[in-house]
Image (spheres, grey):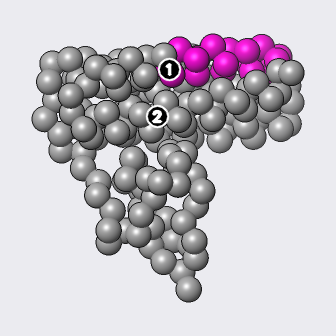
Amino acid sequence: MVRLWRCEICGDPYIGETPPYNCPFCGAHRQHIKEAKDANVNFDVSLSAHDRADAEHALKVEVSNSAFYFCAAEKTDDAEGRLLFKALGKIEAEHAAIWRKILKLDAVPKGSEQCHISNRENLGESHAREARAIDFYRRAAGESENLRIRQIFEALVEIETDHLHLSEQRLK
Ligand SMILES: [Fe+2]
Ligand SMILES: [Fe+2]
């Protein structure tokens, strides 16, 4: 029997017989996916100045990475690579939407980034971007005193680490 599930990180709903192993929208791990009626999702957070600055930076990172991936999804010279970068672009756009909700903005700012023709170069840039995002999110998670903000930063560390592994497998 199908049920309605909800991701506690991005808040998006999912219909299926079993909960997905990763949120299909933001990539959050299984422990963040609950039956919708039991899910605890809150974007109405009162932000300290420090949390706000980190959330604003996180939004910029995700908008930039999403734009890079959508560029690579069009240009990279490898069929599987185009699919990978499209999937990553959608996930990073979802991450940008999380920060848009936390910051109570009407819209996500539009990003524009260059990318490469060479799939290897795009994988290398993906690796560098994800590594930078992870370092930042780890630092931000450690510094926030807000449980919800910390929960999001910690979930993003796990998700971006998955993305790091995708480029590492392909760059071997
Ligand atoms: Fe992301
Ligand atoms: Fe990522």
Which residue is at a point 75% across and 40% down the rendered structure image?
83
- Vertical position of residue 27 compared to residue 55: above or below: below
Q: What residue type is labelled 2?
A: Leu
Location of residue 10 in the rendering, given as x and y in whole percent from the top left corner: 40, 48
Q: Verify whether residue 62 appears in magenta.
A: no
- Vertical position of residue 71 compared to residue 19: above or below: above
Asked if residue 151 lies left or right of residue 53, the reply is right
Q: Mark 2 points at which residue?
A: 156
The Cα–Cα distance between marks 1 and 2, rounded to whole angstroms, is 9 Å
Which residue is at a point 37% across and 68% down the rendered structure image?
36
- The reply to whether the residue tagged 1 has its Cβ within 8 angstroms of ligand 1 is yes
Q: Mark 1 points at which residue?
A: 133
- The reply to whether the residue tagged 2 has its Cβ within 8 angstroms of ligand 1 is yes
Q: Which amino acid does label 1 sit on?
A: Ala
Location of residue 168 in the rendering, given as x and y in whole percent from the top left corner: 76, 24
Give the camera-side residue of 82 and 125. Answer: 125
Give the camera-side residue of 100 and 146. Answer: 146
Graded by Cα atoms within 10 Å as few (under 14), some (14 to 19) or many (20 or more), the crowding at tag 2 reads many
Q: Main secondary structure of the magenta part?
A: helix
Q: State which region is magenta.
A: 115-134
Location of residue 21 in the rendering, given as x and y in whole percent from the top left corner: 60, 56
Q: Are marks 1 and 2 in contact (CB under 8 Å)?
A: yes
